[in-house]
Image (tube, rainbow, N blue to C red):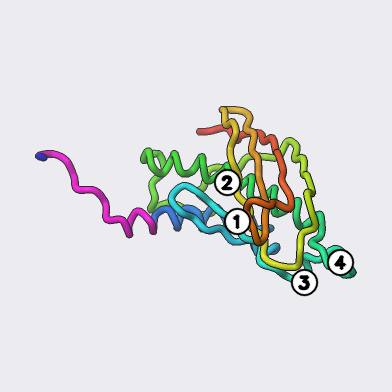
Amino acid sequence: MIGRSPPEPVQVVKERRDRALDALVRGVPYISFLGIEFDRRGDELTALLPFKGAHIGNPDLPALHGGATASFLEVTAIIGLGWSILWEEIESGAVDPATISPERLPKLPKTIDLTVDYLRTGLPRDAYARARVNRSGRRYASVHVEAWQDNRARPFAQATGHFLMPSRG
């Protein structure tokens, strides 16, 4: 077709998306403090909390600390929500991929409340989590997060959070 540019190579698109996610994650220093990592497959993110002895709250069991678990869920929700916003802006062309850095990213949502359900003991091993945005409007968003370890069908914790969306512009 005349006048139509060829699609970008897949590797260029992947690198642009990975660079955006990396900038988003680096914009929250607490993520590196906890050691949380994110794996991206298309627009879906999976958070990973690698096991560290510092995450143990009860050494007699041993069990993950409830605060570490809640922080993991909240971070996953915020990054998942921030990623959904950034994804739309990158794909629509509203954000120039060449300018993506932690300093030039859109502001992240602020937590209004977070309710955590501890379903079973978090064992001393890696944990994974995924966030699902239930609603995202101009002013408010609702996100549900599930965390599991060995079997995704058996979550050890889940959370529902409500977030104040940053003003755009």
Question: Is the residue 14 above or below the residue 85 in the image?
Answer: below
Relative side of 5 to 125, left or right: left
Other residues around mark 1 within 10 Å, as few (<14) / some (14–19) / many (≥20): many
Q: Identify residue for label 3.
A: 53
Q: Closer to the N terminus: mark 4 or mark 3?
A: 3
- Residue 4 spot, x, y in % from top left: 16, 40
Residue at x 38% of width, y 53% of height: 98
Q: Marks 1 and 4, Cα distance to the nearest angstrom? A: 24 Å
Q: Marks 2 and 4, Cα distance to the nearest angstrom? A: 31 Å
Residue 61: mark: 4
Other residues around mark 2 within 10 Å, as few (<14) / some (14–19) / many (≥20): many
Question: Is the residue 131 above or below the residue 66 in the image?
Answer: above
Q: Identify residue for label 2.
A: 80
Q: Which residues are magenta?
A: 2-15
Q: Closer to the N terminus: mark 2 or mark 4?
A: 4
Q: Is residue 144 magenta?
A: no
Choose between 132 and 21: the one closer to the eye. Answer: 132
Q: Is residue 7 magenta?
A: yes
Q: Give yes or no for contact between labels 2 and 1 (Cβ–Cβ under 8 Å).
A: yes
Q: Closer to the N terminus: mark 3 or mark 2?
A: 3
Residue lying at the far bottom in this picture: please name it. Answer: 53
Q: Give yes or no for contact between labels 4 and 3 (Cβ–Cβ under 8 Å).
A: no
Q: Identify residue for label 1.
A: 47
